[in-house]
Amino acid sequence: MSEAVNTDYLDCLLKSWSTKSNEPLSWLHQLRARAIDHVSAQRLPTKRDEDWRFTDISALARLSYQSAQPHDDLQAQDIEHLHIKEAKNSLVFVDGYYSAQLSTIIDSAALEIGNLPELLLTHGTILESHLGQYAKFDNNVFAALNTAFLRDCALIIVPKNTVIEEPVHLLFIATQKEVTSYPRCLIIGESGSEITFIEDYVSLQDAAYVTNSLTEISLSANAHASHIRIQRESTQAYHMANCAVSIAHGSNYQSVSISLGAQISRYDLDVQLIAEAAECAIDGLALISGSQLADTHTCIDHMKPNGTSRQQHKCIVNDRAHAVFNGKIIVRPHAQQTNSSQSSRNLLLSKTAQVDTKPQLEIFADDVKCAHGATVGQLDQEEIFYLESRGLSETTARSLLTYAFGAEIINRIPVISLRQQLEQTVLTQTKNNK
């Protein structure tokens, strides 16, 4: 990294932490303290750093946003339109702080769910062995900042051989302007368990602010998790996110990530297949316009034999927007008989739209089946002509083709009401494309 973290920005962010941290030196306090040390030793990335060469966040370094403060102004009716009807359990966080009055937890012995301070009292040992163990912050200033400010955290523990039929909704709402919030999630799937959860970032106003989120997911042997991530924040906001996933023997992780909002968004997904016969399927869609920038970096690391991974990432880019995708697949020397595929497909809707895509394969084993590919293009004129010949206008034809391009990813979301809602969003955003 090449440029120091803006001193005023960092001082403002750390001030609230230092004035409130009077708890004893527990393992959690020590985790925060280590993160503070790493923040002080790191620098904000610039375009001179290889992993950030297409994403300019210099504007972020000039901000002096202080940490968001808790407040309870929201009422249940204010967020009723954000509820997902299939989700009986929901954890709601407002500007990074847990809201018990807005959350809904169905008492059940089948699922441990709640906020960090509550579950710390009853599940301290298991939390200590997982929290902060997967998302490394020694060379990631945003992960270090999130860990330094770790107080509230959405926690889900799925016990051994337990199948949770209904999805769990983790809702993160931004309401304040010119602040920084630090959402955090930890999902632990014990052996033989199964769960679907939705990580949902929304804004109630079109304002400038910073969201710095971090999610950790641990799947024990033969566990299954379906992870739906929706980012639909204010188009003036900055959204910096990290997610780290550990997949054990015979486990399966499925992810669908949809990026719609934020002026500048960055999502780093690190998936480690740490044991034999682990599987993952990673799908993503960025739909952006105006002057938005959406950057997705993923790494799928095959560490043991007989692993399987599939990835498809799509970008729909209009106006002067800029999409970035960098997808790396690593096959370690002992990860023989790995089967992995990766596809990056990108649709430009204007002459000024831009996409930078870089699929990568790093293979250190000889008995593998791996493939990757990338395409960048515009709508097919022959397809537009065909639809026009069937009576559709050019505008409608373009909208329909654009919708179909994105719908392939959205259709992989297993929650019907959310899928329908996102389909409508795509239709609305594409109907006026020229």
Image (cartoon, rainbow, N blue to C red):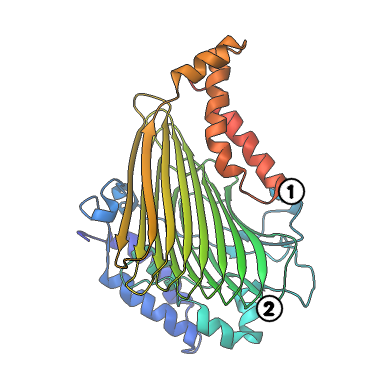
Residue 424 seen in this snapshot: yes
Instruction: Please identify, in this view, whether the residue under mark 2 or under mark 1 is nearer the observer.
Output: 2
Task: Judge by depth and name the residue closer to the eye, 378 or 244.
Answer: 378
Q: Residues within 10 Å of mark 2 (few under 14, many from 20)?
A: some
Quarter of the figure that contains the N terminus: bottom left
Circle 2 sits in a helix, a strand or a loop, which is it? loop
Q: Secondary structure at mark 1?
A: helix
Q: Is residue 250 above or below residue 202?
A: below
Provide residue 230's location: percent of width, then percent of height: 56, 50
Dividing the picture into quadrants, the one containing residue 97 is bottom right
Q: Which mark is residue 159?
A: 2
* Side of 59 relative to 1 (left or right): right
Q: Position of residue 45 (x, y in %)?
A: 27, 57
- Rendered residue at 20%/52% (across/down): 48
Q: Position of residue 62 (x, y in %)?
A: 31, 51
Q: Position of residue 103 (x, y in %)?
A: 71, 62
Residue placed farthest to the front in the image? 367
> Label 1 sits on what residue type?
Glu
Q: In terms of sequence position, does the residue under pointer 2 or pointer 1 come before the other?
A: 1
- Say which quarter of the image contains residue 9: bottom left
Q: Which residue is mark 1?
A: 80
